Amino acid sequence: MSLYSRLVGLFSPLGNLPSEALSYIAESLIMIIIATLGLAFMIYLFRKFMARLQLRIGPNRVGKFGLLQVVADGLKLAGKESIFPKGRDDLPYRVAPLIGMVGLILAFAVLPYGSLFWVGTVTIFDASGTSVSVILLFAIIAIMPIGEVLAGISSRNKYALLGSLRSIAKDVSFEVPMMISVLAVVMMASARTAYPLSINSIVTTEILPYGILEPLGIFVFMVSMVARASYTPFDMGESDSELITGYSTEYSGMRFAMFYMGLFGSILLGSFMVSLFYLGGFNGPLDSSLGVVWLVIKALILVLISFTIWLSMPRIRIDKFVNLGWKYLLPLSMINLILSGILTLGMGW
Amino acid sequence: MSEFVELNFGPQHPSTHGVLRLKAKLDGEIIRELEPVIGYLHRDAEKLCELTFYADNLILFDRMDYVGSMLMESGYLEAAEKILSIDPPERAQWIRVVMNELSRIAAHLVWAGAFGLDLGMLTPFFYCFAERDKILDIFTEICGTRQETNYMSIGGVYQDITPEIMDHILEFTETFPKRLEEIYKLFVKNDVFISRNKGIGVLDRETAIDYGVTGPMLRASGVNYDVRKAKPYLVYDKVNFEVPVSYKGDNLARFLVRFEELRQSVKIVREAVKKIPDGPHFNPKAKKPMMIRLRGDGEYYARTESAKGEFGVYIVGDGGVKPYRVRVRSPTFKNLSVLPVLAKDQMIADMVAISGTLDLVFGEIDR
Amino acid sequence: MIEVKEPRRPIPIVGSISGMVNVARHLFRKPVTVQYPEEKPILPQRFRARIFLRLDDCVGCTLCEQVCPNNSITMQLVDRENPRNKRKIYPDVNFGTCTVCRNCEEICPTDAIYLTHVFETSRTRNSFTYSPQELALQENEVKK
């Protein structure tokens, strides 16, 4: 029993096709709301965690323990004027923040979340729809850099231009190792399932978490996810001490908030992806009806690790990062691919 | 020839400590030409010094290097006391040494935190400032304000040091080295930090001397020159400390020299607090209702070692109650002048790191 | 003179992880923040902020006016019987420009003008200047 089939049952008086369509929409909406709430909580968690690491207290004025601080900040940003710089390229300037946000929310809709007590499996496209959700997921993620690029070149600002140039160089150098390291996971899964491109079947059919079988793979993928979300050490594109805020320099108000949420959303998304592909996702020691809980716990631990990386590392230089991507991560991911090929074919894992 | 992109860093920019403006000509990511533009914090302190009494000028000096204000005060008093021919008593000199070194620790901690921010490390900044706050608490105890202290007076210090304050200072010197090593490890154990600093911005010995660079920057380039040793003032010849020197001349060397100076300063404080002799804390010739009637004649140039380098004060007196001319040799100004040389043909990110190691404080450059 | 020794080049990943652990340990340390309106910091004995004036002790010597570095103090004529102050002039203080340098307290021959712990002196733009009578009053008695 899944959330989808429950919804179909709920809408069944409307007839067969309308009820399916409605339940898809309803489930997507639920997912988007949960993802947005997750983002808001991420921002609160980051501020509180950062404050405690830095011997401060953090937000504690709005609401109990400052829980409503994010809401207050959001309201403040929504009420602010969006400044449009002179000489901008209008359409890309307006669209750029939306592209990143849409890509992010869509990516959350593709992920399988396992099952939760009576709700059943919380999965939209994966179980019932497509069987190639890995490809769909990475296609959606590939949308997000377009927003950064458009923001950089449309806002007619040298800092923004430099920021987006750096972002492109960064994206090009980590995407290839990331895809190859995921390819290794898909390859290992193909020995056991008929649908190795479906994240759901990758996770459900695994014996050991792939992170244990492919330590190189999880390292490369984790580094790529840090670079994807672009926080320190890999925040060359928006390095605040060099390029002010990089491609989002000219943005203000709600458009800036979208870039800001995109950053935290990418961290959350990256943590979900690492835990799904490499740490067993919603598999846990107890009953499988706790799947969502396991997934969230794993993701939260990864999120906290990401924050600690963010707060303790200096920024790497852009040419050094390109070196890292092409000279270290790419060979490592290739070695990882070969090793997992040996594991799959030779050892029969 | 190809054209360069002109980019203005500052004066409102997160990495330009204060109000530095840098006009850069960029070839992609690489800086081909760099021109620092200063003067955004110009307050005309040298001229204002001519308009006020010798005793009042102290507060103008407080606001020069505002992160190490005690060092500025003692630098001014070195010259002013010679002009007014009033010598501070022994006890006041020892107190001044203690306060100078505490102030140097505070200034270097501010630098360390801001340098971390320049490189993108968010956290060390707060650890440094938490430690600095303890020093500012000591300053509050001894003179009543945190930053612009106005503690040293002509002929001594305004308030005497008490045993409780001495205990607090000793307690600080007990706890601080542990925290300092923690912050130090946070930096140097990180290979990204090392890769951002090692071999970047190499300042060789000749260039450093040509440009008049002083302080930790000069010592990192392999010149063993410290005013405290070369021409001891106050009672620096009676305390034991070493001058850290490095021959590498790069960012990392400047970082390490400053951290070694922090350790040496703690050593000096610990020693000097115990050695403070009994006696009066100010010269009775400069008793307080007299402080605006002190007349100075002649001219004198005093050199002191501030947190940034050799801080020189040149005072000409014409026999009146106000100085005829005050001229300040600002170490940071000389150190900044070498930035275009260091940053030429470097990447933007490296330029930010190099300007971080210069330890810029704009109150002192613009005065 | 000592030559600083360069630290050993850290092992790539391990060094960063040790830094992360170092930072994460601070999670269990007490925050240094003092939440001001609820908890007041303990101010040291010599903390100085607001200027007070003992009208009976003031002799009207104008030393404080002369020593004030940014001319915050001006002398005012106050109609008040004081045998020691024949000229009947007393200082007033403009707290908009006062930098609490304490020169006036140091120079005062009769200790009439002195600085105190009171630091909550926020007020509107037009009432920065305290008249001599207001300087003698407590902060809550002064018209904002």
Image (cartoon, coloured by chain):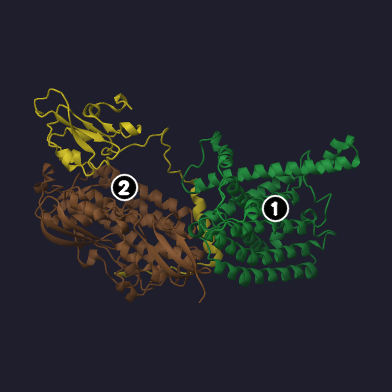
Q: Nearer the viewer, residue C42 or B309?
A: B309
Chain that the image shows in brown: B
How packed mark 1 is, by other alpha carbons closer than 10 Å (few <14, some 14-19, many 20 or more), is many
Q: Colour of chain C?
A: yellow
Q: Quadrant of residue A323?
A: bottom right
Identified at 55% across, 52% down, the residue is: A85
Chain that the image shows in green: A
Circle 1: residue type: Gly
Circle 2: residue type: Gln
Placement of B7 over or under A117, stated as above or below = below
How many marks the image carries: the answer is: 2
Q: Nearer the viewer, residue B37 or B267?
A: B37
Placement of A126 over or under A67, stated as above or below = below
Q: Nearer the viewer, residue B34 or B118?
A: B34
The image shows residue A296 at horizontal and vertical percentages of 68, 47
Which element type, helix, strand or loop, lies under badge 2?
loop
The image shows residue B40 at horizontal and vertical percentages of 36, 55
The image shows residue A344 at horizontal and vertical percentages of 78, 67
The image shows residue B165 at horizontal and vertical percentages of 26, 45
- Please indicate whether residue B184 sits to the left or right of residue B217 in the image: right
Label 1 or label 2, whichever lies nearer to me, is 1
- Please indicate whether residue A39 sits to the left or right of residue B304 in the image: right
Q: Quadrant of residue B333?
A: bottom left
For residue A103, the mark is: 1
Identified at 78% across, 47% down, the residue is: A123
Is residue B74 shown to the viewer in this render?
A: yes
- Chain for numbered disc 1: A
Query: Which residue in the protein does label 2 denote?
Result: B147
